[in-house]
Image (cartoon, helix red, strand yellow):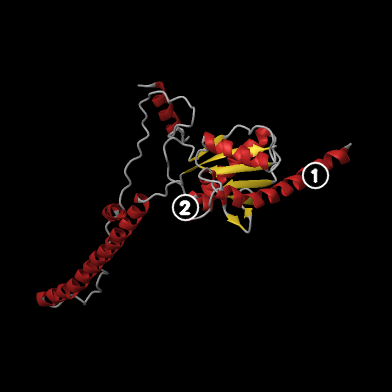
Amino acid sequence: MNQEVIRRHYLDAMGITAWGSRYQLPNALPTEACDWDDVAPAPTPPRERLQALLDDAPAPRRNAPEPQASGEAIASPSAVRALLLKDKPSSEKSDQAKQSQTKQVGAQSDKAEPTADATLATPAKPLKFSLSCLCLNGRWLVLQAGEMRALEQQMLANLLQAAGIQQSALPEVTHFTWPQMTNAFAVEDPLDEAREGLAAFIAGQVSRQEWQLTRLLWWGELGAGQAPLDRILNVNEGQSHTLSLPVWQGPALAALLDGTHSKRALWPELQALNQQWTRDSSTVAEPAVNDH
């Protein structure tokens, strides 16, 4: 027998639960082949458990008849027959009551089983989305749904240079997809877990790159066409509650590649964005001057 299986049997005998990986993490080595003995036994339906309890229950003890006093003997066999006939209906009624009670409990268990099976048959699946991410000068986070193509990156660089925001080349674009597991698994609340996953990804980038985020630039529409990203970012009154950042929303970069009319309509917003960039730069620089 495989050594791992023997070890799991010893742990089970000692009452220690052994855990095994069921999902392959990104970039993780595959699990070595092993004869896992972790198939859980099929649960016994409630009706069968109840019937087993009724079968194993001891028979009720009958009270011994009280000895009759001397001189109170039954007068004739007909009186004995009358007493037996008098007790028989009561015993039959008791048996019928027990049978009807057992049938009612069995019917209730039969009704409860489809409900539990229906709940297990429809598990919640994680929300699926992808987006592109980059950061301007460690302060402004740029997000776009899907993968940002090379032409869209060049368009973004030209717009930011024209607005006087980013004069140098754009930083590297990071692509993020959810869920991170290679095989999808059931979750309790898909929306909350997707929000926590996105927030954890941005928090990891902030920690590694030492960003100091002050604003989110979202390129594209946030509505039914961008579901479920509109719910995941949770934008309300110009604030993303998932990332705790104020949001500036512009048109989709792919739409700006079609003609000059959309670029001309965007120019006033880019000028206002330049003023905000200047104010944020002065706000960040002030603490450094005060420290010296």
Q: Residue at x 72, y 45 (%)?
A: 277
Q: Amino acid at mark 2?
A: Gly
Q: Is residue 112 left or right of residue 240?
A: left
Q: Residue 66: which quarter of the image? A: bottom left
Pick the residue in front: 57 or 235: 235
The local crowd at label 1, few if under 14, some if 14 to 19, many if 20 or more residues have their Cα within 10 Å, is: few
Q: Residue at x 42, y 29 (%)?
A: 8
Pick the residue in front: 183 or 163: 163
Q: Position of residue 114 (x, y in %)?
A: 31, 56
Query: How far apart, in angstroms, are the residues tagged by discs 1 and 2?
Result: 37 Å
The answer to whether 109 is drawn above or below residue 141 in the figure is below
Q: Amino acid at mark 1?
A: Ser
Q: Residue at x 86, y 39 (%)?
A: 289
Q: Residue at x 36, y 31 (%)?
A: 37
Q: Position of residue 106 (x, y in %)?
A: 27, 60
Outermost residue on the right side: it is 292
The local crowd at label 2, few if under 14, some if 14 to 19, many if 20 or more residues have their Cα within 10 Å, is: few
Tag of residue 282: 1
Give the position of the N terminus as an image quadrant. top left
Q: Position of residue 276 (x, y in %)?
A: 72, 49
Q: Position of residue 261 (x, y in %)?
A: 56, 50
Secondary structure at numbered mark 1: helix
The answer to whether the residue labelled 1 contacts the one labelled 2, judged by CB atoms less than 8 Å apart, is: no
Give the residue number, with chain letter if any, for mark 2. 225
Which mark is first along the chain, 2 or 1? 2
